[in-house]
């Protein structure tokens, strides 16, 4: 959280809970990237400041209340402040994703041309985590595979994770068909590459060991799709 925002009026333990960030997702991402030699991009900032997985005009871009917790610093955010957060924290993240995908596509093109064969496929994987209990409701799954335009990729990844022993559900606990995979869809559509999002139960990845194990298995599942 940028120091000037004074933690948006929240206590440290509140910011460190699931309302402030996707617990464990970054560690899973690092492990997947390490095992696959893949590039990675992550936001530096709490989603309570501005949610990079929401469109700029989405009402939930900046939440005044998250899972029943009031966020004082987000009460009555002005249009100017909304635009400031978009410019400083939202736009740089998406620009970084664009640059990363463009470099990956250029590298795939060069590799394909050098070897005289079909281009290696570039795909986008978005990684998030969810709390096991939300608004008093238990979520009985380990991994949600969220998709809209690429069901074949989603089903293949879901099957592979299921074979590794995970309880997999599609478009749960959120639905890609309801537009809740904004970042992956935005960049996949722009660059014409397939995309999918994983929502991981944060009970599995709250420790370094758990995150490493999950990252290893996501990498194994992705290799099966190659």
Image (cartoon, rainbow, N blue to C red):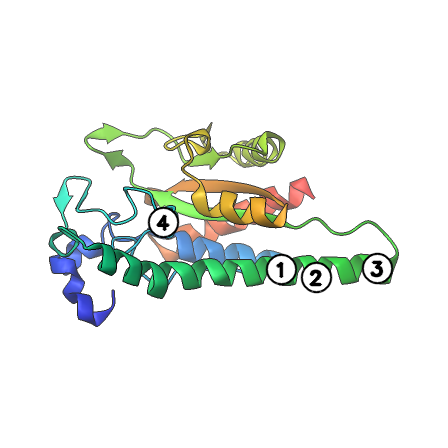
Q: Quadrant of the N terminus?
A: bottom left
State the SS at label 1: helix
Which tag is nearer the camera, tag 2 or tag 4?
4
Q: CA distance from mark 2 to mark 3?
A: 11 Å
State the SS at label 4: loop
Q: Which mark is residue 113?
A: 3
Q: Which mark is residue 102?
A: 1
Q: Residues within 10 Å of mark 4 (few under 14, many from 20)?
A: some
* Residue where numbered disc 2 is placed: 106
Among numbered discs 3 and 4, the one appearing first in the sequence:
4
Q: Position of residue 22 (x, y in %)?
A: 34, 50
* Residue where numbered disc 4 is placed: 56
Among numbered discs 3 and 1, the one appearing first in the sequence:
1
Q: Nearer the viewer, residue 13 or 186?
A: 186
Which tag is nearer the camera, tag 4 or tag 1?
4
Among numbered discs 4 and 1, the one appearing first in the sequence:
4
37 is higher (above) or lower (below) than 4: above
* Residue that appears at 82% across and 49% down: 118
């Amino acid at each position: 959280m940028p120091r000037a925002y004074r933690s948006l009026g929240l206590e440290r333990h509140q910011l460190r809970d699931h309302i402030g960030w996707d617990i464990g997702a970054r560690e899973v991402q690092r492990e997947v990237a390490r095992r696959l030699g893949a590039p990675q991009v992550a936001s530096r900032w709490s989603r309570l400041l501005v949610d990079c997985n929401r469109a700029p005009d989405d009402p939930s871009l900046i939440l005044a209340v998250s899972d029943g917790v009031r966020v004082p610093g987000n009460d009555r955010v002005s249009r100017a402040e909304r635009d400031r957060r978009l410019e400083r924290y939202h736009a740089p993240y998406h620009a970084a994703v664009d640059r990363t995908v463009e470099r990956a596509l250029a590298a795939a093109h060069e590799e394909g041309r050098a070897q005289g064969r079909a281009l290696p496929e570039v795909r986008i994987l978005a990684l998030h985590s969810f709390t096991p209990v939300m608004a008093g409701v238990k979520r009985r799954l380990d991994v949600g595979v969220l998709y809209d335009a690429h069901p074949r990729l989603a089903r293949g990844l879901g099957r592979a994770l299921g074979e590794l022993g995970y309880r997999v559900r599609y478009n749960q606990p959120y639905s890609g068909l309801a537009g809740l995979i904004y970042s992956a869809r935005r960049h996949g559509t722009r660059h014409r590459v397939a995309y999918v999002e994983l929502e991981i139960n944060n009970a599995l990845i709250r420790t370094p060991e758990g995150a490493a194990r999950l990252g290893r298995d996501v990498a194994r599942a992705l290799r099966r799709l190659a």
